[in-house]
Image (cartoon, rainbow, N blue to C red):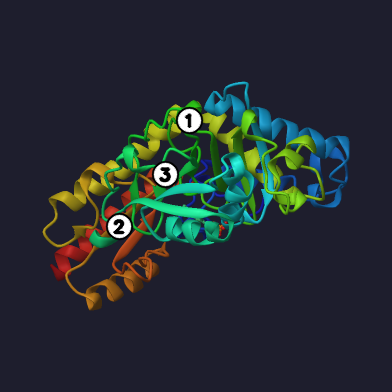
Amino acid sequence: MQGLTKERMAGQPTSSASGRVFNFSPGPAMLPYEVMVRAQEEFLNYGGLGASVLEISHRSKDFVSIVEEATSVFRELVLLPEDYSVLFMHGGARMQFAAVPMNLIARKPARKAAYVETGVFSANAIKDAGPYGTIDTVATSRNIKFVRIPDLDLKRVAEDTSYLHITTNNTAYGTRWNNFPDTGDLPLVGDATSEILSRVVDYSRFALVYASLQKNLGPAGTAIVVIRKNLLGQALPETPPLLNYAVVDKGQSLVNTPSTFNIYFALLVMRWIRGLGGVREIERRNDQKAELLYEYLDRSNFYRPLVDKAHRSTMNVTFDLPTPEATEIFVKEAGKEGLYALKGYREVGGIRASIYNGMPLEGVQALVSFMQEFERKRG
Ligand SMILES: *Cc1c(COP(=O)(O)O)cnc(C)c1O
């Protein structure tokens, strides 16, 4: 129990108590403190087995029950309809940029897919889909530097399109979709990497949702994929088995050895969310954190929020200071105060505070206090 100070017991990481900082990293990102402690506690001896979860077979009943529970807790948290499968796949979200077209684009003979370009990751998704068919960028906000989600006219989507792809939360710019497009029979695919399980989402609106784990759910390198079952089995013949949703579904995410620790860790995070009161409660907390920050930004004449109010993300909050020099000093001084990794995405500049599920309210309060003090001294 060495080092278990009062603050640690209360589950609040504070820089003075535990040596941990408030980590605003965009990903891999700060994880819930209680979950980190739990993983540490059972690291050497998982469930009384006398071995670490890292050291047991992925086919052992103890690990299979981890996969099964991870799947069922996810289903429970998002109220997933019966006709969807939950898969864990290798390679993070970027691997899905290729897996999605490989599995879905041949639904229609024209091999066409429609994409909405809303930032860095959607641009990469468009690029990576290129080899598998005709990719139509049906809306983009590139010309206005991605400060909002563009208007989408579904009439622009050709009749023979296999699916429409959106990025539900844009990590680099700090925008998100508040109203998902109503695509009817056209399958809607969402990259939810930087916001999965952070707000209530009606999964029945989507045909497929994917997310790598390292922003809200755990370690990097694995993606969770939620797919409507009637879309399985239409993959291009050259699709590798590990990228083929039907194969992974049939093998219950255990076709080969998965990143066992990642799935285990995601389960701990999902149990933590359930313990707090579920996605509705975590959404309430996320809204509260984001409002605190945006309210201050809107009042300030020194800081300038970067994106349109109507499309603000609650996960990635971006803003600018009057000069690049001020920004540089801000990042440096914030670092000294235990406010880590606030530098904006390289193509955007400014500041980005990533405040995923694992960031406690206290972290955002500490950031706002620091910002007030910084403004007072330099504004
Ligand atoms: C971080 C991120 C990715 C990339 O995830 P990887 O696991 O590195 O492939 C993709 N999409 C979005 C929206 C992201 O935030």
Amino acid carrying mark 1 in the image: Val
Q: Nearer the viewer, residue 287 or 131?
A: 131
Q: How crowded is mark 1: few (under 14 residues within 10 Å), some or many (20 or more)?
A: many
Q: Does the residue labelled 3 lie within 8 Å of ligand 1?
A: yes
**Does the residue tagged 2 have its C-beta within 8 Å of any atom of ligand 1?**
no
Marks 2/3: CA–CA distance: 17 Å
Please tell me whether residue 262 is drawn above or below residue 285 in the rendered image: below
Q: Residue 168 carries which label?
A: 3
Looking at the image, which residue is at 52% across and 43% down?
A: 11
Instruction: Name the disc covering residue 318, or none.
Output: 2
Point out the tag, 2 or 1, that comes first from the N-terminus: 1
Q: What residue type is labelled 2?
A: Thr
Q: Are marks 2 and 1 in contact (CB under 8 Å)?
A: no
Q: Using the numbered discs, state the Cα–Cα distance from disc 2 to disc 1 in whole angstroms.
A: 24 Å
Indicate the quadrant where residue 28 lies. bottom right
Please tell me which residue is depicted at 59% across the width and 39% down the height of the picture: 107
Q: Which of marks 1 and 3 is nearer the N terminus?
A: 3
Q: In which quarter of the image is residue 238?
A: bottom right
Left or right: residue 178 compared with residue 13: left
Give the foreground label among 2 and 3.
3
Q: Mark 1 points at which residue?
A: 279
Q: Nearer the viewer, residue 183 or 358?
A: 183
The answer to whether any part of residue 28 appears in the image is no
Secondary structure, mark 1, is helix
